Image (cartoon, rainbow, N blue to C red):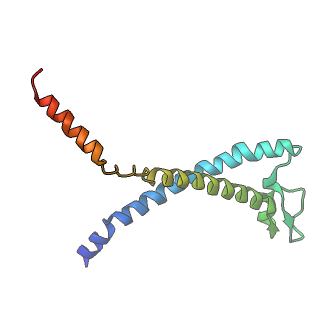
Amino acid sequence: MLQDFKNFALRGNVVDLAVGVIIGAAFGKIIDSMVGDVIMPVIGAVTGGLDFSNYFIPLSKAAHTDMTYEEAKKVGAVVGYGQFITVAVNFIIIAFVLFLVIQAFERMKKKPAEAPAAAEPTKTEVLLTEIRDALRGQPQ
């Protein structure tokens, strides 16, 4: 059983999957930072300084809109639609980048078109080639 597990764990697909998951987690952190630290502040500046992360609808009487989203979550139920907007932008960026990466891989995988096979030489071409070869064989 231990040998079977070792064979399973060391197969190429499992190792590739593990590498993909680790790289994906790191890539996700990069995208989170890009959205949270670069894109959303720009969107906030364009929309008049709006901070999407603090947009929520309080569902309990203890939570109110004067609080930050984190404070409101601690005191009662809230619908954090600002966080949803941020995560949706995250997803769109990740999906677009993955689309570009997959397109690049597909372009690299495509084989170049094969050149058409050379046509058989005509009788005249064969005869001229034989004459040329015969003339080359004679001393000058």
> Residue at point 33% right, 68% down?
9
Report if residue 76 is visible in the image: no
> Residue at point 31% right, 51% down?
120
Q: Quadrant of the N terminus?
A: bottom left
Q: Count the numbered circles shown.
A: 0
State the image quarter where residue 60 is shown: bottom right
Please state if 113 lies on the left or on the right of 76 as rendered.
Answer: left
Please state if 52 lies on the left or on the right of 137 as rendered.
Answer: right
> Residue at point 81% right, 53% down?
52
Query: Which of 135/35 is in front?
Result: 135
Report if residue 119 is visible in the image: yes
Is 135 above or below relative to 35? Answer: above
- Which residue is most to the bottom? 1
Query: Which of 97/73 is in front?
Result: 97
Q: Which percent across, then down, holds residue 130?
A: 19, 39
Q: Which percent across, then down, holds residue 126?
A: 25, 44
Q: Quadrant of the C terminus?
A: top left
Query: Which of 140/115 is in front?
Result: 140
Is 60 above or below relative to 15? Answer: below
Please state if 16 lies on the left or on the right of 40 as rendered.
Answer: left
> Residue at point 73% right, 45% down?
39
Q: Which percent across, then down, holds residue 136?
A: 15, 29
